[in-house]
Image (cartoon, grey):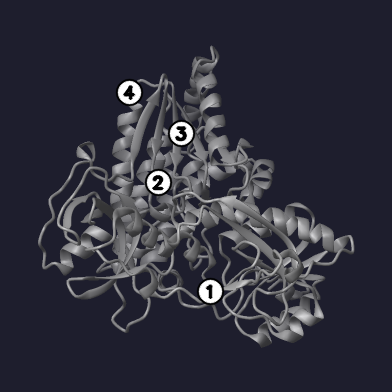
């Protein structure tokens, strides 16, 4: 079956569907929903047997859904309609929510139903719910819908599935006024629901020193109180703001750009202190109740290093703090160290927002890439401890290659991996990938992986050698499996021999080609990306952080737009 994935952007759900469908043998191509003419052209070129609309922001043209079955993934339960389904569910404290796969028809979100299912809600940000509960449910429902379609089944009219006398409910796009925070009346639970309903996008607009600022990354500040609305403390990159019955930590803020368009999402402490005229907030240490995006714990001979950085992004400071915590953990004499990352992302590599905000983006890029290289080098050369990268969340670019610096890489079933850099303006990449990737996959596979620029799921990653194991049907299941496996390794009588072999191999590799040589070669290419005459990286970074809409679908995704040139291949 030929399936066209139609989407506003190649987001996490679309990527997961892409890898799951390809893994099952479907012929899949992707088209960004830019305008009706582009969509019609995609249908004419690819001639799909079904369109799966995984993430749209506008209505499908009638001639398209009449020409081919179009399955629309709606992140809401049966009868829910409208573009802000998950936002409203979080804001209103729904105990359960769902996903429905509909047949596209004239009435938006009102077509016949292929499949629907509900799930319990967690007290979590919109992006986290979307990447886990919504995505897992949507993938299962899409696969069931496609199987039914192939068997000749038909969808069921929505009206026949609703309770007697029941009607579908249309809710409009959520406005900023709907989730505006009233610091003098809203309690902490209400503030957190509002922040979580806008997390990821578009944030919650709130005045800071009279300037509208979008707030992101909200967490409860346990035990802290103050005058409602006042900024009362800072901890790391976050600021603490008082509510009527407590306080919340806010990790990220975004000011509107000078032209009024999309601005940069930056650490909240810098934004607040600048807008407040340089007034410094009282620093609260992590041990004294402060907020931290780094954590370390031990369970017997196993250490766990947690780094749930916002969006899995590493800036220069986060890399340095991660390196310090890593060195501390390695000095503890533990047998096994598990690098857990965060629940939504293990790591996505370098944070592009502070680079774009820097006086010299090239200089800040250089500082950040050297800082993450320092972390990778510390992992590669830690020969007295078995190191495990446990990927509960997605990973990409330098973040994924950083994981390959561990001795073992375990991934949750369902994670999406993006082992490439080229999508960011033909960035060459570092993190010792030219050493780590061929060591795992072989030189030819390494070349194919990086050139393909495609996401992959855990089955393909394991076949290629990028990961060693994939297990766990969800976060809790994966974490439990990690704990059991790590403890078994720590108590395995063969562990000393494994570490001795690790030291022997590292010494042999170093004698063949020093790590410093790999780093120097990679950084020479990166210097060209940052400081050279080709501005592709800087243009791509700008487009990414300012959310500039795509004018076309990249050819590595839009297979139907590839043209074979004799003697050359695809262009």
Instruction: Bin the neighbour count of mark 1 within 10 Å (Cα to Cα): few under 14, some 14-19, many 20 and up.
Output: few
Label 4 element class: loop
Q: Quadrant of the N terminus?
A: bottom right
Work out whether residue 314 or residue 429 is closer to the camera in this orientation and state it: 314
Q: Which mark is residue 332?
A: 4
Q: Quadrant of the C terminus?
A: bottom right
Question: Does residue 408 appear to the left or right of 362 in the view shown?
Answer: right
Mark closer to the observer (1, 4): 1
Q: Which residue is mark 1?
A: 171
Residue at point 62% right, 47% down? Answer: 414
Q: Which mark is residue 510?
A: 3
Mark closer to the observer (3, 1): 1
Q: Is residue 409 visible?
A: no
Q: Which residue is mark 2?
A: 308
Q: Earlier in the sequence, mark 1 or mark 4?
A: 1
Instruction: Bin the neighbour count of mark 4 within 10 Å (Cα to Cα): few under 14, some 14-19, many 20 and up.
Output: few
Instruction: Bin the neighbour count of mark 2 within 10 Å (Cα to Cα): few under 14, some 14-19, many 20 and up.
Output: many
Q: Earlier in the sequence, mark 2 or mark 4?
A: 2
Q: Earlier in the sequence, mark 2 or mark 1?
A: 1
Residue 119, given in percent of the width and then of the height, sits at: 59, 51
Label 2 element class: loop
Mark closer to the observer (3, 2): 2
Q: Is residue 489 visible?
A: yes
Label 1 element class: loop
Find the distance from the CA under tag 3 to the CA under tag 2: 32 Å
Residue 542, given in percent of the width and then of the height, sits at: 40, 73
* Residue 148 found in image quarter: bottom right
> Farthest front residue?
165
């Amino acid at each position: 079956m030929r399936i066209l994935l139609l989407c506003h952007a190649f987001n996490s759900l679309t990527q997961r569907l892409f890898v799951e469908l390809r893994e099952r043998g479907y012929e899949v191509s992707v088209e960004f929903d830019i305008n009706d003419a582009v969509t019609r052209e995609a249908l004419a070129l690819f001639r799909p047997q079904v369109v799966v609309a995984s993430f749209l922001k506008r209505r499908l043209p009638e001639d398209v859904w009449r020409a081919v079955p179009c399955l629309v993934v709606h992140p809401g339960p049966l009868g829910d309609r409208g573009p802000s389904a998950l936002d409203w569910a979080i804001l209103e404290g729904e105990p359960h929510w769902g996903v429905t796969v509909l047949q596209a028809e004239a009435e938006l979100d009102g077509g016949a139903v292929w499949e629907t299912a509900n799930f319990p809600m967690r007290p979590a940000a919109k992006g986290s719910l979307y990447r886990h509960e919504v995505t897992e449910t949507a993938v299962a429902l899409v696969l069931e819908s496609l199987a039914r379609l192939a068997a000749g089944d038909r969808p069921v009219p929505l009206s026949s599935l609703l309770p007697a006398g029941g009607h579908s409910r249309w809710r409009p796009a959520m406005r900023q006024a709907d989730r505006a925070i009233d610091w003098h009346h809203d309690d902490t639970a209400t503030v957190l629901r509002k922040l979580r309903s806008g997390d990821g996008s578009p944030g919650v607009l709130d005045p800071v020193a009279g300037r509208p600022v979008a707030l992101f990354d909200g967490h409860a500040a346990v035990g802290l109180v103050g005058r409602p609305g006042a900024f009362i403390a800072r901890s790391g990159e976050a600021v603490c703001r008082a509510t009527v019955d407590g306080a919340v930590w806010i990790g990220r803020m975004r000011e509107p750009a000078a032209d009024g368009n999309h601005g940069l999402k930056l650490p909240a402490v810098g934004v607040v202190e600048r807008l407040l005229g340089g007034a410094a907030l009282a620093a609260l240490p992590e041990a004294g109740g402060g907020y931290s995006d780094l954590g370390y714990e031990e369970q017997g001979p196993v250490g766990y290093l947690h780094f749930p950085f916002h969006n899995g992004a590493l800036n220069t400071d986060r890399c340095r703090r991660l390196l310090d915590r890593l060195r501390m953990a390695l000095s503890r004499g533990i047998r096994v160290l598990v690098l857990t990352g965060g629940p939504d992302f293990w790591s996505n590599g370098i944070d592009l927002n502070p680079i774009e905000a820097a006086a010299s983006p090239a200089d800040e890029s250089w500082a950040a890439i050297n800082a993450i290289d320092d972390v990778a080098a510390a992992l590669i050369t830690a020969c007295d401890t078995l190191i495990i990268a446990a990927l509960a969340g997605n990973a990409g670019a330098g973040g994924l290659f950083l994981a390959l610096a561990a001795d073992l890489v375990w991934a949750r079933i369902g994670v999406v991996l993006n082992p490439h850099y080229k999508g960011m303006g033909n960035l060459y990449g570092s993190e010792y990938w030219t050493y780590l990737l061929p060591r795992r996959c072989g030189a030819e596979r390494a070349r194919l992986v990086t050139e393909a620029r495609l996401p992959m799921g855990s089955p393909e990653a394991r076949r290629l050698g990028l990961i060693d194991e994939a297990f766990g049907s969800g976060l809790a299941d994966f974490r439990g499996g990690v704990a059991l496996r790590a403890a078994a390794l720590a108590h395995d009588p063969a562990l000393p021999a494994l570490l001795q072999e690790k030291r022997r191999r590292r010494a042999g590799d170093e004698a063949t080609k020093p790590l410093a040589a790999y780093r120097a070669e990679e950084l020479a290419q990166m210097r060209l990306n940052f400081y050279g005459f080709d501005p592709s990286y800087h243009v791509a970074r700008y487009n990414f952080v300012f959310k500039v809409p795509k004018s076309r679908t990249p050819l590595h995704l839009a297979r139907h737009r590839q043209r074979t040139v004799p003697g050359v291949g695809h262009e």
